[in-house]
Amino acid sequence: MKQQLIIFLIFALVACKTFAQTEFPLTPTELPQTQTEPTALQPEAKTDVVILKDPEILATYLLAPGDAIEITVWKEEGLQQQQFLIGPDGNIVYPLIGTITAAGRTISDLNELLSVKLADYIADPSVSVKLLNNQGNAIFVIGKVNKPGQVFAGRRIDVLQALSMAGGLTVFANESNINIQRRIGNEIRVFPFDYSNVIDGEDLDQNILLEPGDTITVP
């Protein structure tokens, strides 16, 4: 009897040891929690801002012969609200500086040019340039439009805009044979313009930005 009891106890001890060494899969709540470092916030991607300065793209108004401008230099006696008419050669004559070319420049460009040149005579000049009238930016529209004659605009305009300002085409206009004449030196360059196509969204490159003195002919 004692021998059987001893055998039973030995068997029980072996069974308990084996059970204790058996690996059981851990439940999710028993899994060790791995601490993860907080992810650093990624900076937002920066979008490059492209500033377009090309007047052909922005249709910025360019000064032209015949325009009247007013120039003021702050706190400088004798240089207050002086008015100038841009001559046929595109120039003005300004005190201290002399002859400078104004035509073909924007108001901002002319302001900067005057500031740079006046800096040789005045410490930190503060210059203000104002356009009084834009009579130099004249486009001529002739032929079969409702209001032929000169068209004035405060900025660069294209062919469609000029035709609109001239009252539009008459019912007798030949829409397909409109042309724009531009004098370059001693030569005259002709640009074709098909009104019907442009209105339909075709050949849009024909709708060019006009230059002062351009003549639109509508047969």
Image: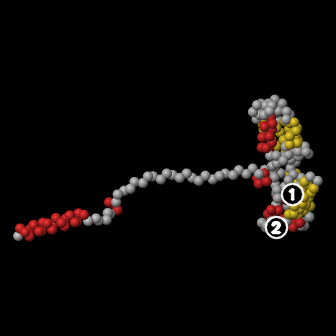
For the residue pair 94 and 16, the one nearer the viewer reads as 16
Residue 197, disc: 2
The residue positioned 75% from the left and 33% from the top of the image is 124
Residue 185 is situated, as x and y percent measured from the top left of the image, at 92, 52
**Residue designated by label 1:** 166
The residue positioned 28% from the left and 65% from the top of the image is 23
| Amino acid residing under circle 2 | Asn
Q: Secondary structure at mark 1?
A: loop
- Left or right, 94 with respect to 26, comes to right
Residue 38 is situated, as x and y percent measured from the top left of the image, at 45, 52
Quarter holding the N terminus is bottom left
Marks 1/2: CA–CA distance = 19 Å
For the residue pair 12 and 211, the one nearer the viewer reads as 12
State whether residue 165 appears in this view: no
Which class describes the residues within 10 Å of circle 1: few (<14), some (14-19), or many (20+)? many
| Amino acid residing under circle 1 | Ala
Q: Looking at the image, which residue sits at the far left?
A: 1
Q: Quadrant of residue 9?
A: bottom left
For the residue pair 67 and 43, the one nearer the viewer reads as 43
Q: How is the image coloured?
A: secondary structure
Which class describes the residues within 10 Å of circle 2: few (<14), some (14-19), or many (20+)? some
Q: Secondary structure at mark 2?
A: helix
